[in-house]
C-alpha cells in the first residue's frame, strides 16, 4: 500500500510570466516545472492522439455529407438537395427573427473623379453601430448593380489597401459598393481603453475573446458577423441608386468566410465571389490550420455540411470561387468544392454558373483575384466590359473614418460583451433550479455524454526511469475510453507492479490533473496533502484526453497554451462536431471511475485541479462510485465568466449554452452530499 511521503514541496506557479488571453499564470505551471526540473520533461507519450481522433471524426462527417451529394442524379434531386442544405444551415446559424431599424446616418461625403464615398453608420442591432463606406459611381444612369464587400482580418478593416482596391475598382466600373468594418476591426473595436485604444488587440484576438464567451449563452460570433452582412445588404438595397436584380457579395480571407456563410443564410444575393477561404473542413484540420470562432459554426460538421454547401444554397445563381496556389487555405479543397458544385449545377442545368479561379500567388485579395471577380460580376450584369482593374488611388485610413475619433465606442456603441452579459443575466433569471434527476438529465444532454458499455479496456505502459514521484514505484495505464482514445492513469505503489491493478476493497483516491499528472505528482501541494492525509489509500492520477500525456503537439510548435493554439483547435472542432470538449473529458473521468470500480475501488475520493475540476465535478455528481470530492482552483460558475468583461478560462472549459440549462453552482450544491471541499475557487479571473 502507498505510504506517507514527507519530501513534497509547493512549487511556485509561473510568477512573472505574461498573461495571455483566456490563459492565466497558473495555466503555465508546465513551463515552471520545466524550468525547475530541466531533466524531467513532463511525459507525453500520445502527442498526436487528439489530432488523429478528430481527423477520424471529421472524415466521417465528410463522408456523411458526400453520400448526400453523390445521391444527386437528376434536376429534382438537385433542387431537393439545395432545399435541404438551406434547412440544415438554418439550424446552425441562429439569426435574429426580426430586423430592427437601421437608423442609418451619412456623416460625411468624399468627392472623387469617378465616384463619391459616403461615410455611413448604421445599427445592425439596437445601439450596435456598424461603420461603412458607400462607393457611388458618378455620371452613370441609375439604378446600378450593388455589391457588399466583406473585409478579412485587417487592423484597419475597410481602409486597408486590398479592400479599398476592390471597392474602388467596382465603383469605377459602375457598381454601388458598400464595404463595412467587421466586429473587432477598423472602427469597431469592442475592447478599448479610455483613449479608445485596443485592450485586446484586434481581429483574431477580439474575435476569439468575444466569440468564446458567447458560446456560454448559445450565441455564435460568426452569426453576429453574418447578421451585420445581412443588414449591410438591407442598407444597400434601401438606396435608390441600387438595382435589386443585381446584388453581389465578395470578400477575402475572413471576408471570404463571411461571403461563404452569407451565401448560405441570405437569399437575395444574385452573385458571389468568395476569395481565399473556400476549401474543406477536413483539409483545414488535417493541415492543422487554426481558424477563429467566426470560421467554425457550432454543429456544422454534425449536420454533414462543408464549405461548398453554403455556396450550394445559392444554386443555381452565379458563384466564382477565388483561390490561390500558395495559400494556406488548401487549394485542393477549393478544387474539390468546385467539383462538387459543378456536379450540382450541372444537374440544375446551369453548369456555366459555377467557376473556379486560382491565382498564382500567396494568400490575399491581390490584383489577379480582384480582376477575376470583376470579370465574373461583369459577365452577370453587363455593366462593364473591362478586362483589367482600373487605375486606383488608395486613401489614408483617417480619410475613410466615419466616426469623429476613429472608434464606435466613442459614440457609445453597445459592446458585444454587454449583449452577452445581458443575455446571461436573462438566462439565469429565467432558469429554474434543477432537482438531482433533472440536473443529471440536463448535464447528459448538454454535454452529449455517450452511453458507456461496461468497464473499458486498457494498456499497461512500460515504466520510464525515475520520475521522482512520492512512491517507490508507479504504473501507468492507458484506459481506452473510446476507440483509440485514452485517459492516462498512473497508480502509485510501494513496489514494482507492472501488471493489472491490484484488486481493491473499496476506497481509493483519483486525482484529475490540470495540465500534467506526471508534473503535478511531483510538484502540486494538493497531491502531497491527499497522500499525507490518506495514508495507505490507493492513489491514482489521471490525464483526461488532450491533457498531459496526450497534450497535443500540433498546430505548430509549443502552441498548446496559445489562444489560437492546439487546445483551442480541438475545443472548436468539438463544437463543430456537436460534441463539447468538456463532455468528452467528463466521459473520460466516468469511464476511469468505471474502470476503478471493476477493480474493486467503489468508494472513490475524486480530487481535481483547475481545468481538471470542471469534468471532475460533472463526473463526481453523475457517478455512484464517488463518495468524496475535493476541487482546487475550480471555476465558481459559468455565469461569472459570461458576465465579466475579463476572463482567463479557455474554450476547452466551456459548455455551450450552459446558462440556459444549469450552472456549476447547482453541481456544487448537489456535491455537498459527497463531502465537497473547495480550495481557492476561482471566478472569471
Image (tube, rainbow, N blue to C red):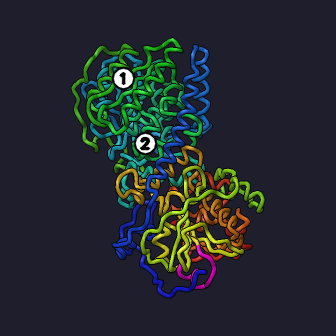
Whether residue 544 sits left or right of residue 379 in the image: it is right
The span shown in magenta is 526-539
Q: CA distance from mark 2 to mark 1?
A: 39 Å
Residue 70 location, x and y as percent? Answer: 55, 23
Helix, strand or loop at mark 1:
loop
Q: Is residue 198 above or below residue 329?
A: below
- The image's mark for residue 104 is none
Q: Is residue 531 magenta?
A: yes
- The image's mark for residue 286 is 2
The residue beneath circle 1 is 175
Q: Nearer the viewer, residue 205 or 184?
A: 205
Q: Residue at 68% across / 73% down in the picture?
A: 504
Helix, strand or loop at mark 2:
helix
Q: Quadrant of the N terminus?
A: bottom right
Bin the neighbour count of mark 2 within 10 Å (Cα to Cα): few under 14, some 14-19, many 20 and up. some
Q: Earlier in the sequence, mark 2 or mark 1?
A: 1
Q: Nearer the viewer, mark 2 or mark 1?
A: 2
Can residue 254 be seen by looking at this rendering? Answer: yes
Q: Residue at 34% across / 55% down in the picture?
A: 557
Q: Residue at 48% across / 47% down in the picture?
A: 52
Amino acid at each position: 500500500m502507498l505510504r506517507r511521503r514527507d519530501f513534497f514541496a509547493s512549487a511556485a506557479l509561473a510568477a512573472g510570466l505574461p498573461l495571455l488571453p483566456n490563459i492565466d499564470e497558473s495555466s503555465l505551471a508546465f513551463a515552471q516545472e520545466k524550468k525547475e526540473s530541466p531533466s524531467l520533461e513532463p511525459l507525453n507519450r500520445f502527442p498526436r492522439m487528439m489530432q488523429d481522433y478528430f481527423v477520424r471524426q471529421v472524415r466521417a462527417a465528410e463522408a456523411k455529407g458526400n453520400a448526400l451529394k453523390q445521391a444527386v442524379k437528376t434536376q429534382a434531386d438537385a433542387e431537393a438537395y439545395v432545399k435541404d442544405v438551406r434547412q440544415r444551415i438554418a439550424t446552425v446559424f441562429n439569426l435574429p427573427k426580426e430586423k430592427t431599424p437601421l437608423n442609418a446616418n451619412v456623416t460625411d461625403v468624399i468627392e472623387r473623379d469617378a465616384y463619391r464615398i459616403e461615410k455611413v453608420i448604421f445599427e445592425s442591432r439596437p445601439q450596435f453601430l456598424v461603420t461603412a463606406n458607400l462607393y457611388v459611381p458618378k455620371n452613370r444612369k441609375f439604378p446600378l448593380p450593388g455589391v457588399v464587400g466583406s473585409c478579412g482580418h485587417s487592423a484597419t478593416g475597410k481602409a486597408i489597401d486590398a479592400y479599398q482596391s476592390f471597392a474602388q475598382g467596382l465603383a469605377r466600373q459602375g457598381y454601388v459598393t458598400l464595404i463595412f468594418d467587421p466586429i473587432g476591426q477598423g472602427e469597431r473595436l469592442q475592447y478599448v481603453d479610455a483613449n479608445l485604444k485596443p485592450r485586446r488587440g484586434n481581429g483574431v484576438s477580439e474575435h476569439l475573446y468575444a466569440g468564446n464567451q458567447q458560446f456560454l449563452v448559445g450565441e455564435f460570433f460568426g452569426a453576429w458577423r453574418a447578421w451585420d452582412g445581412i443588414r449591410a445588404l438591407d442598407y444597400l438595397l434601401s438606396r435608390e441608386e441600387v438595382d435589386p436584380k443585381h446584388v453581389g457579395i465578395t470578400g477575402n480571407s475572413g471576408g471570404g468566410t463571411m461571403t461563404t456563410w452569407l451565401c448560405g443564410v441570405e437569399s437575395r444575393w444574385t452573385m458571389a465571389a468568395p476569395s481565399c477561404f473556400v476549401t474543406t473542413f477536413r483539409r483545414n484540420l488535417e493541415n492543422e490550420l487554426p481558424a477563429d470562432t467566426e470560421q467554425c459554426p457550432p454543429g456544422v460538421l454534425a449536420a454533414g455540411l462543408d464549405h461548398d454547401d453554403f455556396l450550394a444554397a445559392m444554386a443555381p445563381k452565379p458563384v466564382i470561387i477565388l483561390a490561390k496556389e500558395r495559400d494556406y487555405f488548401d487549394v485542393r479543397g477549393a478544387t474539390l468544392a468546385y467539383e462538387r458544385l459543378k456536379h450540382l449545377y450541372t444537374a440544375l442545368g446551369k453548369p456555366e454558373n459555377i467557376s473556379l479561379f486560382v491565382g498564382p500567388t500567396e494568400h490575399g485579395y491581390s490584383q489577379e483575384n480582384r480582376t477575376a471577380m470583376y470579370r465574373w460580376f461583369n459577365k452577370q450584369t453587363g455593366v462593364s466590359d473591362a478586362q483589367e482593374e482600373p487605375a486606383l488611388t488608395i486613401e489614408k485610413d483617417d480619410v475613410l473614418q466615419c466616426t469623429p475619433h476613429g472608434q464606435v465606442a466613442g459614440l457609445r456603441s453597445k459592446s458585444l460583451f454587454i449583449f452577452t452579459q445581458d443575455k446571461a443575466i436573462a438566462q439565469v433569471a429565467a432558469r429554474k433550479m434543477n432537482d438531482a434527476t433533472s440536473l443529471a438529465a440536463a448535464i447528459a444532454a448538454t454535454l452529449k455524454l455517450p452511453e458507456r458499455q461496461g468497464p473499458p479496456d486498457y494498456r499497461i505502459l512500460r515504466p520510464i526511469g525515475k520520475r521522482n514521484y512520492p512512491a517507490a514505484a508507479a504504473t501507468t495505464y492507458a484506459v481506452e475510453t473510446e476507440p483509440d482514445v485514452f485517459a492516462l492513469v498512473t497508480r502509485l505503489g510501494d513496489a514494482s507492479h507492472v501488471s493489472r491493478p491490484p484488486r481493491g476493497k473499496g476506497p481509493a483516491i483519483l486525482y484529475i490533473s490540470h495540465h500534467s499528472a506526471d508534473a503535478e505528482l511531483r510538484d502540486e501541494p494538493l497531491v502531497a496533502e491527499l497522500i499525507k492525509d490518506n495514508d495507505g489509500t490507493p492513489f491514482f492520477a489521471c490525464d483526461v484526453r488532450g491533457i498531459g500525456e496526450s497534450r497535443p503537439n500540433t498546430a505548430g510548435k509549443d502552441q498548446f497554451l496559445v489562444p489560437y493554439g492546439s487546445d483551442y483547435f480541438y475545443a472548436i472542432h468539438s463544437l463543430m462536431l456537436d460534441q463539447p470538449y468538456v463532455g468528452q473529458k467528463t466521459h473520460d473521468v466516468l469511464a476511469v471511475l468505471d474502470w476503478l470500480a471493476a477493480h474493486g475501488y467503489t468508494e472513490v475520493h475524486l480530487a481535481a485541479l483547475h481545468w481538471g475540476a470542471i469534468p471532475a465535478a460533472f463526473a463526481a455528481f453523475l457517478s455512484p462510485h464517488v463518495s468524496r470530492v475535493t476541487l482546487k482552483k475550480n471555476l465558481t460558475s459559468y455565469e461569472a465568466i459570461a458576465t465579466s468583461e475579463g476572463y482567463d478560462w479557455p474554450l476547452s472549459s466551456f459548455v455551450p449554452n450552459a446558462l440556459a440549462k444549469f450552472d456549476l453552482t447547482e453541481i456544487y450544491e448537489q456535491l455537498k452530499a459527497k463531502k465537497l471541499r473547495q480550495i481557492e475557487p476561482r471566478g472569471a479571473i
